[in-house]
Image (tube, helix red, strand yellow):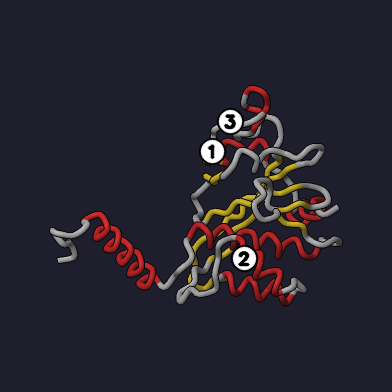
Amino acid sequence: ERFSLTGDITASLRSVLAEYRDLLTKMSGRTNSREITVGLMGELLFIEKLIPHLSDPLRVREEGSEDQDFHLPGSDVEVKTTSSRSKTKVSINDAYQLFPREHRPLHLCHVRMEEDASGKSICDLIEVLVSRGIDRAALMEFCARSGWSDDDEEPLKLSELGLDFYEVRAGFPRIIPDNFAGGSVPAGVGKISYNIDLNSARAFLLEGERDAILRGFCQ
């Protein structure tokens, strides 16, 4: 009954699909995608762990930039988050995300989390960070730039499983401009997205106590 035999069937189909997407959104009670939510949760958790070690203002990736999430005094850091105990694959969204800036160390932080009704939501983490001295307005702007909005009726809640740190250097599994002739991505090639199974990068995993590693990033 949704389709008119005399009308534009393509337009009718698009309308039905749009209504179906809206219905699924309302049924789930969530307007933010799981990917956006999980990724932002990991970044906020990383900031929380950094706070005790920061002596300078925190620098994050500028809007529209293709490089890493955080620029700290001792290292640049790209944060990737998974929401399952068994998941070891992370998504890389550009050839420059794991491409070190000149004369700068680069590390990948794998934030491991899992869905948990008694865990924290993004709003919970925001309140934690504000209580630790982070400016609320700046924090909300950071979240908005990630594509997140504070209007979920049933926000996703996650619990922390742990943070792993990898040194990104020669031999680390990745696609970067140096892999191409001339040291740059070929003209006409759009954004390069791929997955890394971190099981194949165990040789680059940093050993040691987490706070000591974070302290080193901040010095």
Name the residue beneath numbered marker 2.
Answer: 143
Residue at the top extreme?
181
Whether label 1 touches label 3, CB < 8 Å: no
- Precedes in sequence: disc 2 or disc 3: 2
Residue 5 relative to residue 64: left or right = left
Residue 68 drawn above or below residue 41: above
Disc ID at residue 96 = none
Residue 55 relative to residue 13: left or right = right
Nearer the observer: mark 2 or 3; the answer is 3
| Residue 196 visible in the picture | no
Q: Nearer the viewer, residue 198 or 60?
A: 60
Around disc 2, counting alpha carbons within 10 Å, would you say few (fewer than 14), some (14 to 19), or many (20 or more)? many
The picture places residue 41, in percent across and down from the top left corner, at 59, 63
Spatial CA span between label 2 and label 3: 32 Å
Whether label 2 touches label 1, CB < 8 Å: no
The picture places residue 28, in percent across and down from the top left corner, at 38, 70
Around disc 1, counting alpha carbons within 10 Å, would you say few (fewer than 14), some (14 to 19), or many (20 or more)? few
The kind of residue tagged 1 is: Gly
Spatial CA span between label 1 and label 3: 8 Å
Disc ID at residue 187 = 3
Instruction: For mark 2, give the secondary structure.
Output: helix
| Residue 143 visible in the picture | yes
The kind of residue tagged 3 is: Ala
Nearer the observer: mark 2 or 1; the answer is 1
Q: Residue at x 54, y 46 (%)?
A: 91
- Precedes in sequence: disc 2 or disc 1: 2
Name the residue beneath numbered marker 1.
Answer: 190
Q: Residue at x 63, y 22 (%)?
A: 181
Around disc 3, counting alpha carbons within 10 Å, would you say few (fewer than 14), some (14 to 19), or many (20 or more)? few
Residue 142 drawn above or below residue 186: below
Q: Residue at x 58, y 69 (%)?
A: 122
Residue 28 relative to residue 107: left or right = left
